[in-house]
Image (cartoon, grey):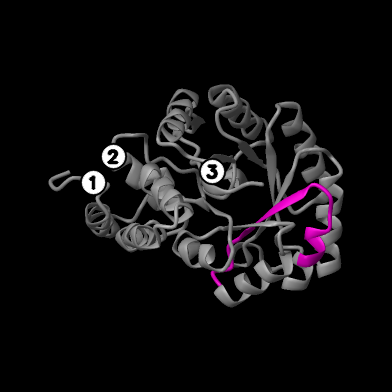
Amino acid sequence: MLWGTMTAIVTPFSNGQVDVDTFRNLVERQIAAGIHGLVVCGTTGEAANLTIEEQLLCVRHAVEQAKGRVPIIAGTGTNNSRVTMELTRKAAALRVDGVLVVTPYYIKPTQAGLISHFEKVAEIGPPVVAYNVPGRTGVSLTAESVAALARIKNVVALKEASADLKLNGMMVREASDDLAILSGDDFTYLPQLAIGGSGCISVVSNVAPADMVELTNRWRAGDVAFAREIHLRLLPLMEALFCESNPIPVKAAMALMGLMSPEVRPPLTKLSAHLEAPLRQAMRASGVLEDGS
């Protein structure tokens, strides 16, 4: 079962092209921090702004750099079942440990259509992590549909990013022990652990991987107070990294740390100038940037 802090890793660019060397360095940085898994070409990885060839390039380099040390989950979801299945086949050939499949966006399928979509993808081979993010897709899985997903062989987890803790709880209840529920929002991670969640696919861990890993490890060790302390310390950073559309702020933060360029692809734009100072302040308050930086 998937568990713990898994980073939804960014895709670095240089002059409009995927920066492979920096990408591999970021993968290594995550592994060195003890991360429990990596999600490549998800929302934070700007999958919607990558060609299929670029997505597969990132997946291949992540698998090669990881060398089996952590699970690599490849984002293969689109709003087209056939395209999703084909991309999943290509990711499987690269020996990924699983695929992240978002609910089809824009089309607004019925609940029956959503379940059918995941059933088709699950037949391909790699373990499937379903991804519920209604704020971006315009459709949400219900708790009853999550119960149905739990009965599909090879659907192993749900990334739940509705930010609705009531729905989260209902999903955990319906999934029972058959489906790992992973928080898709950093600020709901600790509350979701308290109701039976298994982990988090994290944006914040791009910036502060060791802290997010420590939060997970402390929780699993029963040190709830320490886990809560980490969560509360990181809250300003969690908020700041969504001051504009993800991944604009997280790339800006990583640039301030000297890890990569802040470059994003159109129609995304660089962080608004008036938000840089609050981002720096949140990074300092959370302990990821030294005073004066």
Residue 14 % position (x, y): 43, 30
Residue 257's label in the rendered image is: 2
On-image quarter of the C terminus: top left
- Mark 3 vs mark 1, foreground winner is 1
- Up/down of 222 relative to 68, above or below: below
Name the residue tied to disc 3: 45
Regarding residue 129, the answer to whether it shows in the image is yes
Q: Residue at x 85, y 63 (%)?
A: 113
Q: Which residue extends farthest left?
A: 292
Query: Is residue 104 located in the magenta-colored stretch of the structure?
Result: no
Specify whether 71 is left or right of 231. right
Of the residues shown, which amino acid type is indicated by label 1? Answer: Leu
Reading the image, the residue beneath label 1 is 289
Which element is circle 3 on?
loop
CB atoms at circles 2 and 1 under 8 Å apart? yes
Regarding mark 2 in the picture, which secondary structure is present there?
loop
- Between residue 66 and residue 110, name the one nearer to us: 66
Name the residue at 41% across, 31% down: 32
In percent of width and height, residue 12 lies at 46, 35
